[in-house]
Amino acid sequence: MWRDAAGTLHERAEGQVRIVSLVPSLTELICDLGLAWQLVGRTGFCVHPRATLKSVPKVGGTKDVDLAKVRALAPTHVLLNIDENEKATATALAQFVPHLVVTHPLGPLDNPPLYRLIGGIFAREQEAEALCARFQQAHDALARAARYWRRQRVLYLIWKDPWMTVSRDTYIARTLALAGWDTLPASASARYPQVELNQELLRDAELVLLSSEPYRFRERHVAELRTLPVMQGKTVALIDAEMTSWYGSRAIAGMDYLRRLRE
């Protein structure tokens, strides 16, 4: 049996399996484990792999799930994440879905257990172990390279109006830390705090990264920030947020991406 992030023990899925994934990272993982044929529903944010998912019905977003559409799909299993989905959604789904699989990766090293959880429940242990091996290879390559890099303090912006960043108690910050990037502020009461782009915050920042999601920063935003007096002497650049915030199989590509980016 396999225990999920909610503490629920799951037996191996048997019979006709029908999976609805409400988490983009998990949707991609399901496909990479060879389970796409059992995927009957996804959110509109589940976009990888694009060709495979074109024929899979959408059931709303991660925060605004259309429960009626999910019910109509008659899933045996729904995949959820504690941060990305609402607790009220999980409560409602529990009334008609036999199995809710809840996940909550807090850092890159939580990925191999995640592969084994999903692979175990859906009889894809061999594929899960192959992903674990690839993950370890990418993780070790990044760790070896990071030993030669000077650590830098970075401001990683995820939103504007208001400006928002990530605390060090997030999957994103822990991923960046593997590449030698320590996020600012050093401490915060909120996991995704609002910030002011002032001298106090930026004094120690060497690099300002603008993420591609949830707010889609573009080159014009980079140009705008570079004109601000507090940004003088700072490097401002875009970063692919799928490579820093998506867990699951995408984390493997993410570590390779960060290694190339730093090099």
Image (cartoon, helix red, strand yellow):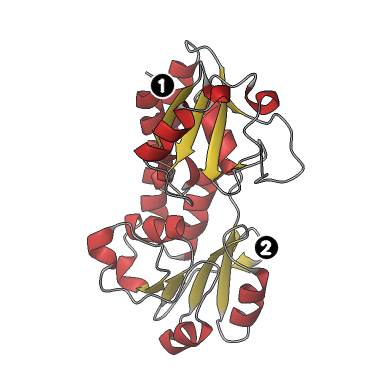
Question: The C terminus appears in which quarter of the rendering?
Answer: top left
Residue bearing the label numbered 1:
262
- Residue at image position (50%, 80%) is 66
Number of marks in picture: 2
The image quadrant that residue 220 belongs to is: top left
Camera-near label (2 vs 1) is 1
Q: Position of residue 258 (x, y in %)?
A: 41, 29
Question: The N terminus appears in which quarter of the rendering?
Answer: bottom right
User: Image height check: is 80 above or below 167?
Assistant: below
- Residue at image position (54%, 19%) is 206
Q: Position of residue 254 (x, y in %)?
A: 40, 38
N-terminal-most mark, 2 or 1: 2
User: Image height check: is 255 above or below 63?
Assistant: above
Residue bearing the label numbered 2:
6
**Left or right of residue 8, residue 123 in this image:** left
The amino acid type, in three-letter code, at marker 1 is Arg
Q: Toward the viewer: 67 or 159? A: 159
